[in-house]
């Protein structure tokens, strides 16, 4: 099984960069079955990578009005594909694009981390920092459930 973890967000807008930072942390784990991609925004070019994996996990920041805790949910491509933006898209439209261009759409899910501060700046709020730590632990367990990380290695990944 291969998994893509795509973390995205603007690291210059405080908590908005949490998804990006999570993906950069997962990259340091150097897991052979995991492709971790950190990007400021979702681009159509990601559809090629999505078509090559068995599952894709999108990681992003959400407003606390959407969720006050980590929130994980399955994603499905839209039944009808509308026009895609030239430079950015959302996870569902990327799944649809992968299906349309490459004839393959893997299973997918979305992990949302609650954000609280979105002003200019590179410092995360304490609540989002704590949520990031929880998200990294959640990802380790999630990967272990899929046989990507052996349970005894969980502590070494998040050090």
Image (spheres, grey):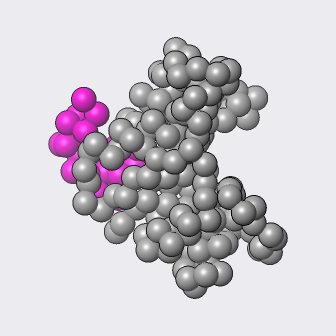
Q: Is 154 situated above or below 116?
A: below
Q: Is 67 situated above or below 77?
A: above
| Extreme-bottom residue of the structure | 103
Q: Position of residue 9 (x, y in %)?
A: 58, 40
Q: Is residue 20 left or right of residue 119?
A: left
Q: Is residue 119 left or right of residue 105?
A: right
Residue pictured at 19% horizontal, 43% vertical: 153
Please state which of residues 138 and 18 is positioned toward the viewer in this rendering. Answer: 18
Residue pictured at 25% horizontal, 39% vertical: 157
Q: Is residue 96 visible?
A: yes
Residue pictured at 49% horizontal, 52% vertical: 6
Please state which of residues 44 and 94 is positioned toward the viewer in this rendering. Answer: 44
Q: Position of residue 134 (x, y in %)?
A: 44, 30
Q: Is 101 situated above or below 94?
A: below
Q: Quadrant of residue 2?
A: bottom left
Q: Is residue 141 visible?
A: no
Q: Position of residue 84 (x, y in %)?
A: 75, 66
Please state which of residues 96 and 45 is positioned toward the viewer in this rendering. Answer: 45
Q: What is the quadrant of the C terminus in the image? A: top left
Please state which of residues 63 and 71 is positioned toward the viewer in this rendering. Answer: 63
| Residue 144 magenta-highlighted | yes
The main secondary structure of the magenta stretch is: helix
Tag count = 0
Q: What is the quadrant of the N terminus in the image? A: bottom left
| Residue 32 magenta-highlighted | no
Residue pictured at 39% horizontal, 41% vertical: 24
Q: Which residues are magenta?
A: 138-159
Q: Position of residue 44 (x, y in %)?
A: 62, 65
């Amino acid at each position: 099984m291969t998994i893509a973890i795509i973390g995205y967000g603007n690291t210059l807008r405080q908590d908005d960069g949490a998804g990006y930072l999570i993906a950069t942390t997962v990259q340091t784990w150097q897991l052979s079955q995991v492709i971790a991609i950190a990007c400021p925004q979702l681009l159509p070019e990601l559809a090629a990578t999505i078509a090559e994996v068995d599952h894709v996990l999108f990681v992003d920041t959400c407003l606390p009005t959407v969720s006050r805790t980590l929130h994980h949910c399955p994603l499905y491509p839209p039944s009808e594909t509308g026009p895609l933006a030239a430079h950015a898209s959302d996870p569902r439209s990327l799944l649809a694009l992968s299906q349309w261009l490459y004839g393959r759409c893997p299973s997918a899910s979305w992990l949302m981390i609650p954000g609280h501060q979105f002003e200019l700046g590179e410092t995360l709020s304490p609540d989002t920092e704590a949520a990031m730590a929880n998200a990294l632990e959640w990802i380790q367990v999630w990967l272990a459930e899929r046989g990507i990380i052996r349970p005894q290695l969980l502590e070494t990944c998040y050090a």
